[in-house]
Image (cartoon, rainbow, N blue to C red):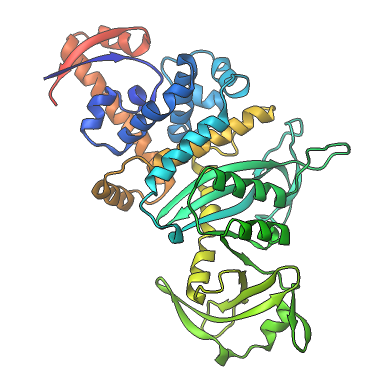
């Protein structure tokens, strides 16, 4: 028999499990790992009240249907006025960069056995849609999902793709240029900063992958200076320098015949590809890979460029397809973790909200490091949405178990109810391991 002290608080340990963290770890429940990681790795970065809010916010992002400050706050029995949680996000003096750096250390530990050659850094941008015009730095930007313009925040971010692992790393907000603004940075410059941050944080990767928007000679030159490869889709109006004269990428593709393409297997899929090293204006020597995904070549050709001259076409294509992982992250974080659900005007608070979304996403993936259990967990819960629903279900189950155990110990329903609704109440009880 073990003895534990239960204190009702808004923490992942008590709310998600309804049981002491130490007891939950013994059961090896996936979400128990989340609680342990938060306690072990982040607690020293906050004051005691800040850490309670940190726990509350992460829990709310994972299990709450409404991811706003008010919505998260309303989910807790022992809640205080939402202004305290709002102050934690918008005005409290904790450093989100320090928190993010600690999270990146966790990621590095998790992928330390994966060779550099299997790790890619993906760069992309997304639009966080908003309806209010008085939010700091909100603007009208091109929206790829609608092929039109929408109101919101433009966010450029980096993601580590290492075999079956997908972890967001960092972000930068793209702000529209204002007259006299000396700190303005283009999205290319923001991408440069994200790559530099990953490199300086000693994140291991062999290649940087991005779409044609980010393919600029300055960015490519910087990646090469780090002794890294790059892969990008090429715009069809890029100019290839041939011995016979200059030709556009689209003209080059049209000059190819079907018999020049080879059938290539990419995991369980077959594509039809052609590769050649060419010289492209402003980029220099580039390995050009053209491929179709249909056997009759009825789809539009995808044209990739890379400085990975020694890589086979299948590796170039497979690596570029990992870029889709960041699109999946954006979708998951918006649908399941409230990436767009902030209702605050200060950019400082909004950025902290995004970093906490990154933390919630990462912790769900790091819910266990037991290889066998991870195989089971991934088989049962394939998506972030599945894991969020599992965490919510586990919350209810363990809270009910906690009530049952308390009733068994106290033999008094009113005392149990008092404990549930009185956050300052304490009790010792026993249960079997």
271 w.r.t. 117: above or below: below
> Can you say which quadrant of the picture contains the C terminus?
top left
At x 51% / y 73%, what residue is drawn? Answer: 311
Question: In terms of depth relative to the viewer, which is nearer, 136 or 286?
Answer: 286
The answer to whether any part of residue 75 appears in the image is: no
The answer to whether any part of residue 123 appears in the image is: yes
Question: In terms of depth relative to the viewer, which is nearer, 396 or 33?
Answer: 33
Instruction: Report whether 375 appears left or right of 265.
Output: left
At x 61% / y 47%, what residue is drawn? Answer: 196
> Can you say which quadrant of the picture contains the N terminus?
top left
The x and y percentages for residue 213 are 70, 59
Q: Count the marks: how many?
A: 0
Question: Residue furthest toward the right?
Answer: 179
At x 44% / y 60%, what residue is drawn? Answer: 118
At x 47% / y 37%, what residue is drawn? Answer: 103
The x and y percentages for residue 358 are 51, 39
The x and y percentages for residue 386 are 39, 45
304 w.r.t. 50: above or below: below
Residue 76, quarter of the rendered image = top left
Question: In terms of depth relative to the viewer, which is nearer, 300 or 375?
Answer: 375
148 w.r.t. 306: above or below: above
The x and y percentages for residue 378 are 33, 50
């Amino acid at each position: 028999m073990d003895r534990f002290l239960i204190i009702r608080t808004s923490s992942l340990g008590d709310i998600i499990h309804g049981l002491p963290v130490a007891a939950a770890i013994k059961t090896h429940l996936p979400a128990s790992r989340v609680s342990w990681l938060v306690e072990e790795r982040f607690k020293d970065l906050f004051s005691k009240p800040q850490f309670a809010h940190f726990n509350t916010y992460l829990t709310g992002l994972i299990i709450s249907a409404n991811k706003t400050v008010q919505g998260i706050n309303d989910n807790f029995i022992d809640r205080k006025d939402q202004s305290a949680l709002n102050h934690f996000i918008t005005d409290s003096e904790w450093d989100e960069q320090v928190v993010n750096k600690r999270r990146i250390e966790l990621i590095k530990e998790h992928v330390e056995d994966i060779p550099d050659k299997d790790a890619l850094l993906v760069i992309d941008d997304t639009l966080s849609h908003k309806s209010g015009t008085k939010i700091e730095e909100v603007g009208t930007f091109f929206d790829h999902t609608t092929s039109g313009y929408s109101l919101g925040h433009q966010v450029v971010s980096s993601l580590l793709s290492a075999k079956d692992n997908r972890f967001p790393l960092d972000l930068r907000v793209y702000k529209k240029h204002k007259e006299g603004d000396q700190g303005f940075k283009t999205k290319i410059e923001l991408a440069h900063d994200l790559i530099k941050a990953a490199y300086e944080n000693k994140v291991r990767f062999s290649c940087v992958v991005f779409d044609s928007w980010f393919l600029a000679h300055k960015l490519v030159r910087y990646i090469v200076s780090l002794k890294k490869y790059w892969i990008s889709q090429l715009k069809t109006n890029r100019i290839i320098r041939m011995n016979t004269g200059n030709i556009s990428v689209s003209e080059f593709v049209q000059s190819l015949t079907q018999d020049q393409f080879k059938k290539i297997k990419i995991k369980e899929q077959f594509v039809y590809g052609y590769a050649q090293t060419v010289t492209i204006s402003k980029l220099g020597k580039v390995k050009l890979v053209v491929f179709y995904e249909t056997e009759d070549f009825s789809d539009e050709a995808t044209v990739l460029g890379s400085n990975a001259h020694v890589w086979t076409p299948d590796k170039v294509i497979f690596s570029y397809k990992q870029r889709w992982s960041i699109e999946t992250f954006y979708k998951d974080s918006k649908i399941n973790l409230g990436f767009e659900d902030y209702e605050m005007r200060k950019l400082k608070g909004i950025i902290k909200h995004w970093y906490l979304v990154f933390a919630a996403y990462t912790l769900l993936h790091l819910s266990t490091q037991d290889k066998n259990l991870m195989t089971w967990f991934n088989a049962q819960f394939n998506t972030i949405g599945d894991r969020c629903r599992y965490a919510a279900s586990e919350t209810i189950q363990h809270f009910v178990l906690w009530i049952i155990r308390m009733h068994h110990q106290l033999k008094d329903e009113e005392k149990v109810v008092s404990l549930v609704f009185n956050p300052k109440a304490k009790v010792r009880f026993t249960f079997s391991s």
